[in-house]
């Protein structure tokens, strides 16, 4: 016989997995937009609104479970982590929206030199992989998978600072490109941070261990 | 923080049935320690061993040591009555003496010990009822029967009666399980206040109560101590899978 709280935890878990998939689509679409120079802002805006509302719903559900079941131990850790993760997902979509906005306002990376778009494409592939890892680790509460994110996080961080240095050395032709590319790598780096937070939350909910993967 | 009670390899039996197996734990002074576990796990027996009440049951047996301030309460020359005076007990069902007034209930222990001085008794009645947070509710009707009080008030009267003997440790065996939620909440608040001056050990099968009132929690299962630690650790991140399963309601 399953416990009454299990139904609620399952609902919350399903809600988060759905959020995860939608955030992946959102982040991936916004990156594609700025790399190809296509306008995706209104589409991302809609997706982002849905994600914010899903994040609120997840938080409400978590509060309800706390109020009704006074969860302890792994139940409590799961709920706490799910609340944090829902927020992290909402942040993914916020940065995706920011990237789409830059693309809309400054023309993304299409006006930049080739090395810049290639560099950012490479960095965004790594970040998208991290987003995928965070979602998959969450779905199966896979702590081993969660731990693997630390290495990519380090690479993305390095790439971020390396890019800033390169920009100083090889100043792009237009200031538009300088601004848009700096903001985009910054947002990508922040998305990577949130992917790492999600993996830390997965480890915490599964083991109670508070780890830093950064 | 020093240890008030040290339980060393304590085992207990009812006839041939062993109910506690080799329990070793140290209870800190002036904190609330909760003992939790499913029915029949030995939690009541454990606290009854702490003030030598277990041996009052026919064919009951205890081995091991229980040190109170470093001295074994099962030592050769120790008088169990003296132990019980230092370690008071409050039971599941409020049990004031029904034929006695509130006043007489409060000082029943003192009177049994031969105290007759009216002034002294008056002082103890007020002090104990105040400490049990009952004084304001009963001060104008101390002559009324203890049985006329509500369940929650009766339980606080029993706590006052235990406090009147000036114990150092208070054992509570499911002290709120016969009370309504409001009365239970008052007892829980009182337990927190009592811990400022007394060492409190509470047996409860209400896990949320243990989480609310205690500083340390011990989980007993089938007569064994499975896990003992800070209440925060036990309820956030228990080490034993058995503890996890019990407190999250997977069994019990």
Image: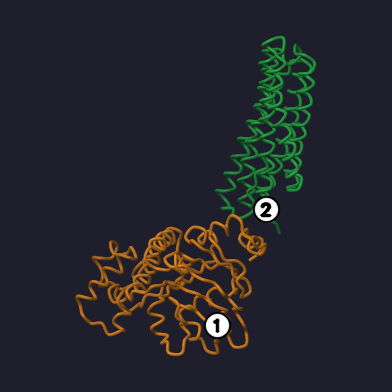
**Crowding at label 1, few (<14), some or many (≥20) Cα neighbours within 10 Å?**
some
Disc 2: host chain: A
Color of chain A here? green
Position of B126 relative to B98 (above/below): above
Task: Estimate the x, y position of residue B110 in percent, counting from the top left.
Answer: 30, 80
Q: Name the outermost residue toward the front.
A: A169
State the colouring used for the structure image.
Answer: by chain
| A122 relative to B231, above or below | above
Q: Which mark is residue B64?
A: 1
Colour of the chain lettered B? orange
Specify the quadrant of the image occupied by residue B194.
bottom left
In the displayed structure image, the side of residue B112 where residue B94 appears, left or right: right
Tell me whether marks 1 and 2 sit on the same chain: no
Tell me the residue that label 2 is attached to: A207
- Find residue B178 and report its horizontal and vertical position in percent: 47, 67
Q: Residue B237: which quarter of the image?
A: bottom right
Q: Is residue A20 left or right of residue B5?
A: right
């Amino acid at each position: 016989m399953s416990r009454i709280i299990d139904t609620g935890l399952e609902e919350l878990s399903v809600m988060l997995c759905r959020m995860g998939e939608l955030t992946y689509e959102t982040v991936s679409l916004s990156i594609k937009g700025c790399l190809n120079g296509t306008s995706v802002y209104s589409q991302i805006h809609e997706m982002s609104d849905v994600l914010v509302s899903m994040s609120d719903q997840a938080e409400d559900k978590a509060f309800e479970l706390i109020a009704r079941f006074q969860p302890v131990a792994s139940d409590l850790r799961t709920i706490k982590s799910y609340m944090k993760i829902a927020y992290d997902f909402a942040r993914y979509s916020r940065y995706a929206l920011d990237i789409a906005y830059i693309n809309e306002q400054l023309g993304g990376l299409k006006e930049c030199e080739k090395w810049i778009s290639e560099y950012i494409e490479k960095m965004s592939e790594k970040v998208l992989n991290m987003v995928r890892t965070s979602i998959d680790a969450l779905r199966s509460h896979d702590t081993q998978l969660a731990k693997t994110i630390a290495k990519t996080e380090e690479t993305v961080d390095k790439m971020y600072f390396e890019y800033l240095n390169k920009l100083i050395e090889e100043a792009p032709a237009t200031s538009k490109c300088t601004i848009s590319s700096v903001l985009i790598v910054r947002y990508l780096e922040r998305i990577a941070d949130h992917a790492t937070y999600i993996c830390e939350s997965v480890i915490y909910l599964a083991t109670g261990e508070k780890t830093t993967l950064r | 923080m020093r240890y008030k009670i040290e339980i060393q390899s304590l085992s207990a039996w009812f006839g041939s049935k062993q109910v506690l197996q080799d329990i070793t734990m140290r209870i800190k002074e002036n904190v609330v320690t909760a003992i939790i576990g499913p029915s029949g796990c030995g939690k009541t027996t454990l606290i009854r061993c702490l003030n030598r009440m277990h041996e009052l049951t026919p064919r009951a047996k205890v081995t091991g040591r229980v040190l109170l301030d470093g001295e074994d309460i099962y030592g050769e020359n120790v008088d169990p009555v003296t132990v019980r005076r230092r370690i008071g007990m409050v039971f599941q069902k409020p049990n004031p003496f029904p034929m006695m007034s509130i006043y007489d209930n409060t000082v029943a222990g003192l009177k049994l010990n031969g105290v007759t001085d009216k002034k002294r008794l008056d002082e103890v009645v007020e002090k104990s009822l105040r400490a049990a947070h009952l004084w304001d509710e009963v001060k104008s009707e101390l002559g009324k029967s203890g049985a006329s009080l509500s369940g929650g008030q009766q339980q606080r009267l029993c706590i006052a009666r235990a406090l009147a003997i000036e114990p150092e440790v208070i054992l509570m065996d499911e002290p709120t399980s016969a009370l309504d939620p409001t009365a239970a909440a008052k007892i829980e608040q009182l337990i927190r206040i009592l811990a400022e001056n007394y060492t409190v050990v509470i047996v409860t099968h209400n896990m949320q109560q243990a989480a609310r009132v205690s500083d340390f929690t011990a989980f007993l299962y089938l007569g064994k101590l499975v896990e003992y630690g800070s209440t925060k650790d036990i309820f956030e991140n228990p080490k034993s899978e058995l503890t996890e399963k019990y407190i999250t309601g997977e069994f019990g």
